[in-house]
Amino acid sequence: MSGIALIDYGAGNLTSVRKGFAAAGADLYSPAAPIDLARARGIVVPGVGHFSATSVLGVPWRLAIQQQVQSGIPLLGICLGMQWLFEGSEEAPDVPGLGLVAGRCRRINAVRPLKVPHVGWNALSRSGPSELLHDVDDGAHVYFTHAYAAPVTEECTAATTHGERFAAVVETGRVFGVQFHPEKSSDAGLCILRNFVRVVQS
């Protein structure tokens, strides 16, 4: 299927995300301007690195994405893209998040021998019903790479622990976020991408 918009704001490995979705049976397009979201059947916001990178997604982009979400278009945030779904991050206090999920992201509190950034495979601990995790086993391992994380709130459907517990998957309505990289997470990640494509198709 086509019609899933992959937001390119210079903060993500779009090639691997495209490959992951291609394996899940979807073709992505990158909108050049906010108006190009009008034809989107789904939206994906990827991202790695510093939260300040999201400042490129200024008011026109924010309004266009929010309008699409309000009209029922599914939205998936990946890694930094998930953090952007929240109100903001201590990493860049002056840069607002999209505010679709309450709370702010903060640096992971881990002590030696654990290291920050949190890089590598870690297990998902399910904490509620999840469309995104349909057919994904509780305890499935996925690939993380990040130093900041979102709090465990009522929108959290799976968490993980690296020195402390934090949100790994969030869902509210048709808004979804994953702190890890499903496109790099083997069979579990592919299942998650397929589940998002199924939501888009429904």
Image (cartoon, helix red, strand yellow):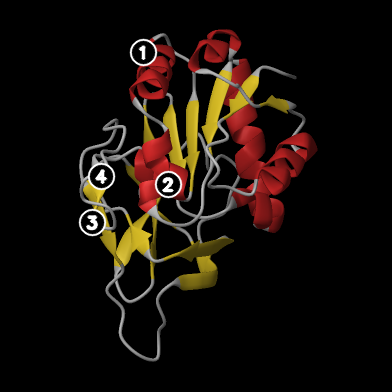
Query: Where is residue 188 drawn, in percent x and y?
Result: 64, 52
Q: Residue 88 carries which label?
A: 4
Task: Say which quarter of the image contains residue 161.
Answer: bottom left
| Position in image of residue 128 (x %, y %) | 36, 44
Q: Which of 135 and 37 is in front in this view?
A: 37
| Helix, strand or loop at mark 2 | helix
Q: Say whether marks 1 and 3 touch (CB < 8 Å).
A: no
Mark toward the start of the polypeptide (1 vs 2): 2
Spot occupied by residue 32 in the image (x, y as percentages of width and height)? 60, 21
Residue at x 75%, y 26% (from the top left corner): 27
**Is 57 positioned to the left or the right of 14 in the image?**
left
Quadrant housing residue 154: top left
Circle 2/circle 3 CB separation < 8 Å = no
The amino acid pointed to by label 4 is Gly
Between marks 1 and 4 in the image, the one whose residue lies nearer the viewer: 4
Q: What secondary structure is marked by label 1?
A: helix
- The disc placed on residue 70 is 1
* Mark nearer the N terminus (1 vs 3): 1
Residue 107 in percent (x, y) is at 29, 65
The residue carrying mark 2 is 53
